[in-house]
Amino acid sequence: MPDYRLAPEDPFPAALEDAVAVYRGLLHEGYRADDIVVMGDSSGCGLALAALLVLRQDGTKMPRALVFITPVFDFAGNGKSLKTRAAKDPFKLADPMGIAKIYVGANNPSSPVISPLYGDLAGLPPILVHAADYDVFLSDSLRLHDRASDAGVKVDLKIWPKMWHIFHMQDKIVPEGKKALEEMCSYVKNSIIDVA
């Protein structure tokens, strides 16, 4: 887990620069891209995907697979689920995009290096997305699935009924969280075995 710089002390593009440097550093140290699976949760998914879009532009080899847990890919806040899931989302945030605004600052929130949902997704590795039905950010998963699939990327999307944002963290007390983590581990293991 990279210790990247955080807002508000270090807003965009600090975290993106750090994420790109971490991936390049792994390759520089001799790790093969085919042995790397990039994972993230929440807004970390947006950061990870934005970093890969930057890396792809300079011809850097993509990782073996991507795994995203209840992702946030649209820092402009255009997802319909911000409204349609507001009543069901247990967090009841007054402004779900509040933290994103601190990271974005005066920059364009629809820029692909901030909100990768608006970028060209062609050429990405296979993706597993775990979304939650009671999450105000559900639309980000649905839109990523559609846009990436249209770009020829293999995307496995699973929407967990009656679950909430990053429910995986409650795996000790929520059976669905435990099952979700097990499924993710199986996906990662099988991804690496496929290329070995």
Image: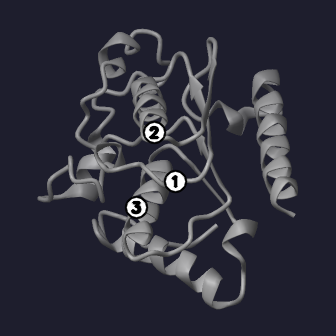
Q: CA distance from mark 2 to mark 3?
A: 12 Å
Q: Residue type at mark 2?
A: Ala
Q: Residue type at mark 3?
A: Leu
- List the residue tagged with mark 3: 53
Contact check, label 1 and label 3, Cβ < 8 Å: no
14 relative to 2 in the view: left or right: left
From the viewer's perspective, is residue 155 above or below residue 63? above
- List the residue tagged with mark 1: 124
Q: In this orientation, which residue lies closer to the viewer: 20 or 54? A: 54
Q: Residue type at mark 1?
A: Leu
Give residue 26's position: percent from left, percent from top: 64, 81
- List the residue tagged with mark 2: 148
From the viewer's perspective, is residue 161 above or below residue 12? above
How many numbered discs? 3
Indicate which disc, 2 or 1, sits on the residue closer to the N terminus. 1
Contact check, label 2 and label 1, Cβ < 8 Å: yes
